[in-house]
Amino acid sequence: MKTINKLLLLMFLSFYGFLSAQEVVNLELPLKEKNLPFGLIQKVSEYKPKVCLALSGGGSRGIVHLGVIKALVEEGIPIEYIVGTSMGSVVGGLFSAGYSLNDLDSIITNINWEELFFVTSEDRRNLFVDQKITEDKALFTIRLDGVTPVIPQAINTGKKISNLLTNLTLNAPLNEIKNFNKLLYKFRAVTTELISGKRIVLNSGSLSEAMRASSSVSFLLPPIEIDSLVLVDGGIVDNLPIASAEELNPDMLIASDVTSPLKTRENIIYPWDIADQLVTIPSRKLWEENKDKADILLDLSNLERSNNNFSNITELIEFGYQYTKNNIERIKKELLRKYFEKINSDNTKFYNLRLNNNPNDVEKKIYLKLKDKPYLTKADILFELSKMNETGIFANLSANLKCSEETILTINYKLNPKIKKINIYGITLLTDNDINKFFKDLRNKPYSSPEILKSALNLIRYYRNNKYMLTNINRIFYDKASQELNIYIDENKISDIIFDRNLRTIPPVIEREFSNLLNTHLRSDAFNESLQNLSATDLFDNIVVSFKKDSMANKNLELKLDEKLPNVLRFGVRFDNENYTQAALDIRNENLFGNGSELGVSLAGGKRNMNLVLEHKSNRIFDTYLTYKAQVFYKFNDVNIYKDDNSEFVDRFSRSKISEYMQKFYGGFIGVGAHLKKIGTLTTELKYETNIIKGLTNYAKKNEYDKNITSIKLRLQIDSQNKYPYPTKGIFINTYYETAQEALGSDVSFAKFSFNYIGHFTIANRHTIQPKFIFGFADNTLPLSQHFNFGGQNNFMGYREFEFRGRQILITSIAYRYKIPINILFDTYFSFRYDLGSSWSKQEKIKLKYLKHGFGLTLSVNTPIGRADFSVGKSLYLKDTSPERILSKGPYVFYFTFGYYY
């Protein structure tokens, strides 16, 4: 018996010694909670480094950042924070708001950036016809504070980019969040406080306003006022926002640098080049100090692209993508170092990694990643556990290492409970099939916050793609007991419009633009139209729109409005070969009594013409689309009379001035009409005016007259031209029927019809075809002062202005305009035009076989002070020299026009 006991003791001691030789190391992965959108919570590894992405300014070069982000996300680099300056804030802010990379690529690629930053006038598509005429005529506009001129703070009003950022922000999946820490990525926008010169980092408020403030490039865009701060481009103090990123205390800082170097001596040509250089010098010094503080500096500054060149945007995105891909191993190596730095384990080495006899799937996956290493450390195992945890399906993860001659790896884990059922509440706008497709892959799989977040974001993006702006997910809740995922959707309606009612502008002027949105599921197309309409009133410098819930959980549209001064002074100038130097001055109150109507006086003309007008008008009467205008006017212009010269050559002709007269018009009219959306106006006008013909040189006294004319005019104007001058698409139509009757108090009775059409059709961006048609007729009682005019640079080539006048007119023409690819400071065009037509004093004289022909060439330059057109034209017609008709050619006629029309 003793022998047996001794044997058992020996066996026990041997087995105990074997166990002691097998050291067991337990590795527990510490987890912490991270808040995600929609009330979701993810358990993340405490060892996971917080990665901050700093995006520099750089104008158009900043679009490269999108390619950088694409590559980082594709390679699984976990971004926690995004800090952006200027264009970097726009790219980073929109990405943080939940746009997918594909959506953001499409958005940025399709934006007309040049128009946003460098076109100072309003988009003609958003203006009523009368507003288009006002915009087209002005050389520059200045606001008045009383009688004191207020110098503009920038060459661009900034309204276009503000409206764009508002639209993009409110159409983002996460469009209600005011705390930037609660966005998909914690976001910061770097700005400069203009008064103190301090760096201000925005972390809350309106996302669109923050991006706009960070992008307020000096001289180009005006500052943005937020609370008591006056904010401009953050690039002045932190163009590569490493200092701002460091304040977030990230574990790893990746900086994407697309800043431009200082200009060379050869590139400093214009005053604005000097101004840009003066602003860049101090920011460049800060850049030198900070650039080496980043853990990873993606130096993309060697990009051969100026910061105002927005052509071929796809190339910019691809450049950033490829550059980052080429540096991804360096980034991953640094990320791994940061992981190991945080794990901070001892350097114990484990050799000969093996699995137990029945490994689970997690053990197999980790083993495949580690098996080829010559040895392992605790940090290697914890790193793989951290990466595995990012799937979000684990409740906990740990590892056991049994060490002897071999290291046996055991992974202990607990999966989250499965999602057996998904309940979605609040759907009325979409079908169940539309919704279920986003969540079907979650069923019967372990609960995973990251996967649920992806599905939820895709659902909201689907709503946005269907133009529903207000729909959001209030909450996502998982019931562990029933294993049901509950998703609460709020499709929302607009309950009220909120704004400061202590403005100069009366509330109905503002409310009428948004009243159609009340109690509706707000759609992006309707919202955009309302925003553009309010912007087009030209009563506000800046409009910030956001969604706000009241105490009753109603969703309201909140407007922050920065009013313009109502008094405005416009100035224009024109030079041409017919009327020489002319100037125009227009002063008016554009918000009379706060109701959006205008009262103003304008004076335009020169030595040979003048137009003095006092007018009151309203583009909208109350909340209707009716329009009203009343004018009192005094006008005159001098008219030359020409006659054929005697010539011994039948195949040539010339004409010379033989006399001159002045025609005067004074009186007034009142008109009421209706807008045809934004492209047309149909009006009825009642006019009383005095027409005077007075001789100036060699004009027969008997032809002079002084007549009172009372008429009714029905007018249709359509203007869909995309720009002025030199439109590339759209049409312009001006047609009217006018009748004057003695019964109305007129000295003469007549009826008159006029139709004027010009179209613009462009091929391949440079080739524009312009057909034109002018037709008019009147009865024989039409007085001379009301005759149609034939001839001139823009009417009929080869003849001078007013060279012929008649009661009937017919002109058809076709023009071809080519935009010269070489940009000599300004856009330059070359065009050819062929005209066919004539005018007649009486209907019985109309004979189409005697139509005149004209053709001409024009060189045009779109200068900052107006269009400049230099033309040469020649006319010809078939002369009846019985028994045959001979082609008779006129002399070359030279024309020039410099400035806007009046």
Image (cartoon, rainbow, N blue to C red):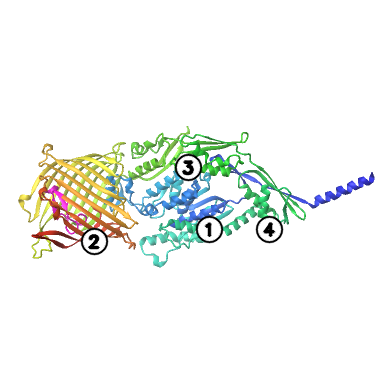
**Disc with the residue nearer the chain's start (3 vs 4):** 4
Where residue 597 is drawn, which disc sits there?
none
- Whether residue 852 is visible to the viewer of this picture, yes or no, is yes
Q: Which residues are magenta?
A: 784-808
Tell me which secondary structure the magenta stretch mostly adopts: loop
Task: Find the distance from the CA under tag 2 to the CA under tag 4.
Answer: 78 Å
- The front one of 410 and 200 is 410
Q: Residue furthest top?
A: 552
Q: Amino acid at mark 1?
A: Thr
Q: Amino acid at mark 2?
A: Leu
Snapshot quadrant of residue 412 = top right
- The front one of 575 and 109 is 109
Q: Residue furthest front?
A: 883
- Vertical placement of residue 548 versus 645, above or below: above
Q: Residues within 10 Å of mark 1 (few under 14, many from 20)?
A: many
Residue beneath label 4, please? 373
**Disc with the residue nearer the chain's start (3 vs 2):** 3
Task: Find the distance from the CA under tag 2 to the CA under tag 1.
Answer: 52 Å
Quarter of the picture holding the N terminus: top right
Asked whether residue 848 is drawn in magenta, I would say: no
Residue beneath label 3, please? 462
- Image side of residue 878 versus residue 621, left or right: left
Image coordinates for residue 610, horizontal then vertical, percent = 18, 51
**Disc with the residue nearer the chain's start (4 vs 1):** 1
Residue beneath label 1, please? 324
Residue beneath label 2, please? 857
Between disc 2 and disc 1, the foreground one is 2
Q: Amino acid at mark 3?
A: Tyr
